[in-house]
Amino acid sequence: MTKTQQGILKFAVISFALFLFFNVVSPCLFSLSSAWQRFLAVQDEIGVASGALYYTDVAVTQDSEAHVREAVREGMLERAKRAKAKE
């Protein structure tokens, strides 16, 4: 078996394993977990889209990014000031 064939076989096996995990194992685990079922029920009651919980709420994500960027810039300026002070 050539390296290319081995690579294709490895890709196919990993793809199949991921398919099984996300389409067979995960739903089984979900059905056994009352906590996950309650989480989904609460989301449905409130009307929250699950994607909004994971970085897709653009306004909140944008504000968070702005604050993090500002904090990093301040930290970099402070570090530069300390480096100059040591010279």
Image (spheres, grey):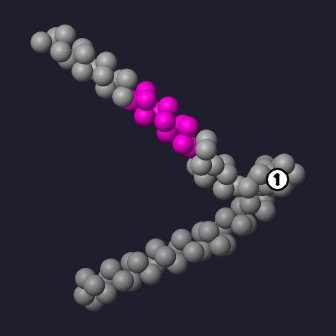
Classified by dominant secondary structure, the portion drawn in magenta counts as: helix
Q: Residue at x 65, y 73 (%)?
A: 23
Q: Is residue 13 magenta?
A: no
Name the foreground residue: 54 vs 1: 54
Q: Residue at x 60, y 74 (%)?
A: 20
Residue 34 visible in the picture: no
Residue 63 visible in the picture: yes
Where residue 52 sits: x, y (%)? Answer: 67, 51
Q: Residue at x 37, y 23 (%)?
A: 74
Most distant residue in the left direction: 87
Where residue 26 sits: x, y (%)? Answer: 67, 64
The residue segment tinted magenta is: 61-72
Q: Is residue 51 rendered to the left or right of residue 80?
A: right
Residue 79 vertical placement versus 42 (above, below): above
Where residue 31 sits: x, y (%)? Answer: 78, 62
Q: Is residue 67 magenta?
A: yes
Name the foreground residue: 33 vs 50: 50
The N terminus: image quadrant = bottom left
Residue indicated by mark 1: 47
